[in-house]
Each structure stands twice: as C-alpha cells, then as structure tokens.
C-alpha cells in the first residue's frame, strides 16, 4: 500500500537492522496438539525476551515468572514504574538467575524513576553481584549494570562518582565488543553526560563525536541516535 511504499522509499539509501526473539516448544515433551504447543511456545518467548534482545528459549515451567517480567518491563517503557515495581517484587528472589537478574535491573530502574534512589542503589548492587558471579567481572552485562549505577550517582548530584564508573563501563565494552558496537556508542553518550555535569566540555564533545560517528555508520543520518548526538553537540557549542 501507499504507506509501505513511502516507508521503502524513505529507507532506500539505508540498511534497516531488524532482530527477533524465539520461543520454542517441543513435541511430545511439551504437548501433542497445536493449541498446547503454541501456548507453551508463547510462554517460552516471554522467557527469551526476559533475557534481552535477539534471544531464544525452550519452554520451561518458569515461564510464568518470565511473563510477569515482560509485563513489568512493558510497564516501565509506558511510564508506569509503580505498576512495574509491584509486578517485579515477587521476582527479586527467583531461583532462576535468568529471571532474577533482569528483575533486579528493572526494579532498580523503577525505583530510580520513582525517586527512591537508596532502594535503587541497593537493587543495582545486588544486580552487579549476581552478574559478576554469573559472567565474570568484566563481562558486557556487568558494564551495562555499571552504567545504571553511574546514571543513579549522576542523579544524586555526584557526577564525580559517576564519571569513573562510566569510564570503567566504557573500557569493558571496548575490550569485549570493539569500537563500532552500538552499546559502546551508548556508553560514550552516558560518559559525555557525566563530563558535561563536571564542565569538562572538550572531553564531553570528544565522546559525543565518537558516538555520532558510530551511529551514522550504523543507522544513517536520520536515525534517532544521530539526532540525539547532534542535539547534544549543539548544546556543547553553547558552552
């Protein structure tokens, strides 16, 4: 139709990046008829999404927790942190680390959004301990959790504490993902925020420009991330 043709024309010079998550149910182990297998594959899909983007999961009885986690994350995205936190609270002691760790992260973000910063700090501390035990101290998951802590310290008015955390997170991501990965670009944006708060404008500009380079190469000039970088650079030019 016309909308589809317009969208294709808009993307003609760019290479859109898509991804998916997959839930898997097996027959006869998980069911023998279509309805039962589809229901359990759908349940497994929530488990996959609970672990992040671009994942797959086989059905297990823990899928109910994963479904609640997915609902809570959706509530966070829709600006309903109190509702999300209510869903997340029973999951914070889950035995399955694939549920518990993302629940701790989401609950920390919910408390942050609600201004409950001390609770957020405790939840992020538990998350870091879990992730280090699961993946080792320099894994990208640990780096991303450190970024959450850095943003929390920034909002507590402690940019001087946020900065070394942000630098450590960026170093981990560079070592494990390389210079061109989008998570590295996001880490540079976050680091630039801490530098800006400390009035270290030249260093902030350097990080913004490097993030801009990565996003332009990956998504083209008209992406949301490129717009964010350009807007931030405009603000830096005013300083």
Image (cartoon, grey):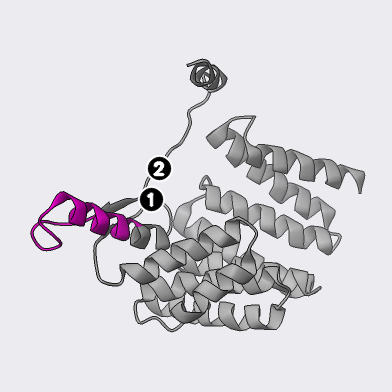
Residue at screen point 81% across, 73% down: 157
Residue 179 at what x, y percent from top left?
A: 53, 48
Magenta segment: does it hold 36? Answer: yes
**Contact, CB < 8 Å: mark 2 with mark 1?**
yes
Q: Taking 172 as reference, is 202 above or below it?
A: above
Specify the quadrant of the image occupied by residue 37: bottom left
Residue 204 at what x, y percent from top left?
A: 77, 53
Q: Taking 120 as reference, is 26 above or below it?
A: above
How many residues crowd mark 2 within 10 Å: few (<14), some (14–19), many (20+)?
few
Which mark is drawn over residue 54?
1
- Along the horizontal axis of the image, is 14 left or right of 192? left
- Along the horizontal axis of the image, is 203 left or right of 221? right
Specify the quadrant of the image occupied by residue 220: top right
Residue at screen point 32% across, 67% down: 63
| Secondary structure found at label 1 | loop
Q: Nearer the viewer, residue 50 or 199?
A: 50
Residue 17 at what x, y percent from top left?
A: 46, 36
- Along the horizontal axis of the image, is 68 left or right of 59? right
Residue 25 at what x, y percent from top left?
A: 20, 56
Start and end of the magenta stretch? 24-45
Magenta segment: does it hold 122? Answer: no
Circle nearer the N terminus (2, 1): 2
In the picture of the structure, the residue carrying the numbered disc 2 is 19
Q: CA distance from mark 2 to mark 1?
A: 6 Å
- Residue 51 visible in rendering: no
How many residues crowd mark 1 within 10 Å: few (<14), some (14–19), many (20+)?
few
């Amino acid at each position: 139709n016309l909308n589809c043709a317009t969208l294709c024309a808009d993307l003609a010079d760019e290479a859109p990046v898509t991804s998916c998550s997959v839930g898997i149910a097996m027959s006869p182990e998980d069911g023998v008829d279509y309805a039962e297998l589809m229901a359990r594959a759908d349940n497994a899909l929530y488990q996959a999404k609970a672990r992040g983007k671009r994942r797959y999961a086989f059905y297990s009885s823990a899928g109910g927790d994963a479904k609640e986690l997915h609902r809570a994350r959706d509530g966070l995205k829709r600006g309903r942190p109190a509702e999300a936190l209510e869903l997340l609270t029973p999951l914070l002691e889950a035995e399955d680390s694939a549920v518990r760790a993302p629940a701790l992260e989401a609950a920390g973000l919910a408390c942050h959004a609600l201004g409950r910063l001390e609770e957020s700090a405790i939840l992020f501390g538990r998350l870091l301990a879990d992730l280090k035990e699961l993946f080792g101290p320099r894994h990208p998951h640990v780096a991303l959790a450190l970024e959450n802590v850095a943003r929390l310290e920034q909002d507590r008015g402690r940019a001087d504490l946020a900065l070394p955390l942000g630098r450590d997170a960026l170093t981990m991501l560079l070592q494990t993902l390389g210079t061109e990965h989008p998570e590295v670009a996001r880490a540079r944006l976050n680091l630039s925020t801490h530098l800006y708060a400390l009035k270290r404008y030249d260093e902030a500009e350097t990080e913004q420009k490097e993030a801009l380079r990565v996003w332009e190469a990956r998504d083209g000039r008209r992406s949301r991330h490129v717009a964010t970088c350009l807007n931030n650079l405009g603000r830096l030019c005013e300083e």
